Amino acid sequence: MMRQEGSSPVADRQVRGHGDQALFIEVKAYGRLSMFSRSTIRATVDNLQAVLNAMPLPVIMKDRSHRVVVANDAACTFFGTPREALLGSLDEQLPEDQRAVFWKVDNQVFETGEPNENEEVVTDAKGDVHVIVTRKRLVELDTNDGREPFILAILSDVTKIREAEARAAYLAEHDPLTGLSNRNRLTDTLAEAVAASGRSQTKVGLLLLDLDGFKQVNDRYGHVAGDELLRVVARRLSGHVRSGDTVSRIGGDEFCVVQVGVQQPAGAFALAKRLIRAFEEPVLVGQTRVSVSASIGIALFPDDASGMDELYNNADMALYAVKRSGGGSYLRFDHFPEGQVWPEWDVEKELRAAITHGDISLAYQPLCDGMDSVVVGYEALARWTHPERGEISPDVFIPVAERTGIIRRLGAWIVERACRDAAMWPDHVRVSVNVSSTQLEDGHMAGTVRHALDVSGLAPRRLELEIKESALIGATEMVAQTFSQLKEIGVLLALDDFGAGTSSISSIQRMPFDRIKIDRSFVSNLDSDARSVAIIRAILAIGKELDLSVTAAGVEHESQRIALRHMGCPELQGFLLGRPEPLSRVNERAEQANEGKEAT
């Protein structure tokens, strides 16, 4: 019998003919057999189709061979297929891999008779991907061939719901500004890392990082610039860790790195150095280049803590110690009895060993011409990398060296090493070395300097000794004698932190200084304090009248550099112009500068 237009295959197969005047259909309706005319059957089928079409959800029915026998309008719209083409099809509108998933579930329902609810990813006719929840159940209908099973499926598009759920889950564990893990996720990450370290017999390094100078950027350039800076910081940090390590933003300008698979503390120190170097280049925020540095506190599991909370607290204590000592460095936590972070007798003992074993090195921060920012010198800064504790701040070991007398040996090494390094630089580039009051008073300073110049071959005029104003308070006759001897040798003398103390004027009047360095506190307030501007102008005037060169220290922003240049400051120093870096980098820059000159 030919199927009539508008009818469904199921209805056709249910029809039993007894001539043209009457047709019978056997249906299960209220548990009894009913008899209908052809017109009644057609009306029933049409009404059923109308009901299905009114449903907003796609509804289809398939037979045992997976052929579609019923489809409502919503199903036709979803699959982008006319009903005439959809009926009798074998899900050709679906990609083969998705069709196989549907068929597998269908077969399971056919075999067990149990309803099924399954979530699947489906590509519609437009190529858009949807997440579909399909509810399927088995129904049995009487047909010409007897009673046969069919699958009735209702499809619900939950794509937007799943997207919202995924977004909520993401935001629960990620920082929306940077995309990094947040504090909530950090707890799980740390727990996983600690558990894995026990199985692999390795350590977990927890590095807490705080930005130095972030508040100034926020205050000066606004929160939009601050947010952009945080995004750049996140990218830089992520670019300097291994794939198994995790970078998190835990609030404000605080970041955290969970380092896994650490064999020795040196591995955590190496990572800390990489992260600190990531801030050597200024950050471009809009059209402005800003400079920030990083302070890092380190704690290792299980060496420094027995659990996650203790590990975090100890890393935080180490970070606080770094910030208190001036920032821009890293420190590992160590706990000692009576609340002492590191007893002085231990510092003295290990400092002596460090000098013997060559664990002390020098970093060089550039001194630049105030007009064109060309490098005219470098300040030598002592650095101590402890094999267990990491970078030890000079604020920690220099005072101990002075109190214990180690400074004589350490100071002599620094002067000689600096002179040897500077001898490789162009003749117009000088090296500056800090000298303590203890060195000035011991009567050996002049001899130390002569020896360093002799063995290095450095011209005396290229060595500058910097003395803090505080070192001259209560200066003895020996200090005055040392100054006189140093001037005879021909080295330059600079008064550091000028203006910060109470005897600046008398110091340059009594001692034969060649240079004064403006204290960084005046430079940092240059943009916001008119009195700092007036003081700097006065210092420049004093320098000019007394024939003293002047260096402004602590230049960190372009606006400060421009203001100092307009005031005629001869020399500048600060993070804007360059951070302390190892000799290899200094020599590399010098070679690049020479190549540039030759090319022109």
Image (spheres, rainbow, N blue to C red):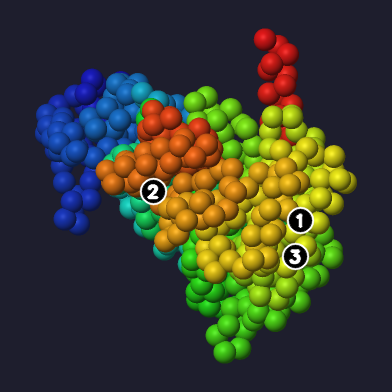
The image quadrant where one finds the N terminus is: top left
**Relative horizontal placement of residue 320, taking residue 156 as reference (left or right):** right
Instruction: Say if 558 sits above or below 450 in the image.
Output: above
What type is the residue that disc 1 sits on?
Ala
Question: If you read the primary sequence from the N terminus, does the residue marked by circle 2 or circle 3 appear first?
Answer: 3
Residue drawn at 52 percent across, 36 percent down: 547
Q: Quadrant of residue 439?
A: bottom right
Of badges 2 and 3, nearer the viewer stands 3
Residue extending furthest bottom? 338
- Amino acid, disc 2: Phe
Q: Secondary structure at mark 2?
A: helix
Q: Secondary structure at mark 1?
A: helix
Q: Real-space Cα distance between discs 1 and 2? A: 33 Å
Q: Which mark is residue 446?
A: 1
Q: Which residue is at 81% across, 45% downward?
A: 453
- Secondary element at tag 3: loop
Mark 1 closeness class: few <14, some 14–19, many ≥20 residues within 10 Å: many
| Amino acid type, residue under disc 3 in the picture | Gly
Q: Are marks 3 and 1 in contact (CB under 8 Å)?
A: no
Percent position of residue 231, x then y: 43, 42
Residue at the spot of label 2: 522
Q: Residues within 10 Å of mark 2 (few under 14, many from 20)?
A: many
The residue sitting at the right extreme is: 455
Other-residue count near label 3 (Cα within 10 Å), few / some / many at <14 / 14–19 / ≥20: some
- Residue 491 x, y percent position in the rendering: 70, 44
